[in-house]
Image: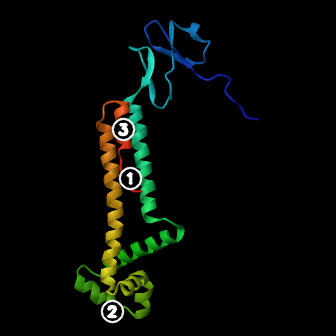
């Protein structure tokens, strides 16, 4: 059996000072000094009582909190899309990222890294840098160039999404009204 609410809040009832007593269903108007209809689209998560207006109004701070959370969630979704369009692609990206880290651990200069790489046995090179070696063969260059491509791809995807997220959050926080905050959030130009 599904329990449904017996009544849906449609009015706000207030006292003699204009302070909110409760939000309730139609028919409870007599419980206070006055009442007002809830605005269209009323949501407790985005509205607050205005004693001055004696009405529920959108609260810019509440809207901001929700919008910033939505932007951050979308940024995470975009990061996932940019690095893992599929289960196998995700594993490939993780392996390439691990190869970049392993490459960096070979030394602190290009010469030291190449010396250490060339000092590895063929089996160890193939095991530790399989994607870099395959990529280098496909591009007709070398594993160092492949690692540079991997690093650029990892950095570019993260930087782009991070910049969009930072700009959207800054614009939301700078806007004065709930409507302006929504417009700022909508202006985020996420990659498609």
Q: Which residue is mark 1?
A: 190
- Give x and y (percent) for residue 181: 35, 36
Tell me the distance, in whole angstroms, between the alpha carbons under discs 2 and 1.
44 Å
Q: Is residue 31 left or right of residue 73?
A: right
Neighbourhood count class around disc 1 (C-alpha, 10 Å): few under 14, some 14–19, many 20 upward = few
Quadrant containing the C terminus is bottom left
Looking at the image, which residue sits at the far front?
A: 192
Any part of residue 39 in sight? yes
Judged from the image, the secondary structure of the residue bearing numbered disc 3 is helix
Q: Residue at x 41, y 75 (%)?
A: 96
Q: Is residue 21 left or right of residue 78?
A: right
Q: Are marks 2 and 1 in contact (CB under 8 Å)?
A: no
Q: Residue at x 42, y 62 (%)?
A: 82
Q: Which residue is mark 2?
A: 119
Q: Is residue 104 left or right of residue 5?
A: left
Q: Residue at x 36, y 91 (%)?
A: 120
Query: Which mark, residue 44?
Result: none
Neighbourhood count class around disc 3 (C-alpha, 10 Å): few under 14, some 14–19, many 20 upward = some
Tell me the distance, in whole angstroms, between the alpha carbons under discs 2 and 3.
57 Å
Q: Which residue is mark 3?
A: 183
Quadrant containing the N terminus is top right
């Amino acid at each position: 059996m599904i329990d449904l609410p017996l009544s849906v809040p449609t009015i706000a009832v207030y006292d003699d000072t204009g302070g909110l007593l409760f939000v309730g269903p139609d028919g409870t108007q007599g419980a206070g000094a006055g009442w007002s209809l809830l605005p269209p689209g009323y949501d407790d998560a985005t509205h607050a009582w205005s004693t001055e207006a004696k009405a529920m109004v959108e609260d810019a701070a509440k809207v901001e909190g929700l919008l910033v959370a939505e932007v951050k969630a979308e940024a995470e979704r975009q990061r996932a899309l940019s690095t893992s369009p599929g289960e196998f692609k995700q594993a490939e990206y993780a392996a390439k990222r691990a190869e970049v880290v392993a490459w960096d651990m070979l030394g602190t200069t290009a010469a030291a890294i190449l010396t250490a790489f060339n000092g590895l046995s063929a089996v160890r090179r193939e095991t530790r840098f399989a994607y870099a070696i395959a990529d280098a063969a496909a591009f007709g260059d070398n594993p160092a160039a492949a690692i540079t491509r991997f690093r650029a791809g990892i950095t570019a995807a993260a930087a782009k999404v991070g910049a969009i997220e930072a700009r959207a959050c800054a614009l939301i926080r700078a806007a004065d009204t709930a409507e302006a905050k929504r417009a700022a959030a909508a202006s985020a130009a996420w990659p498609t």
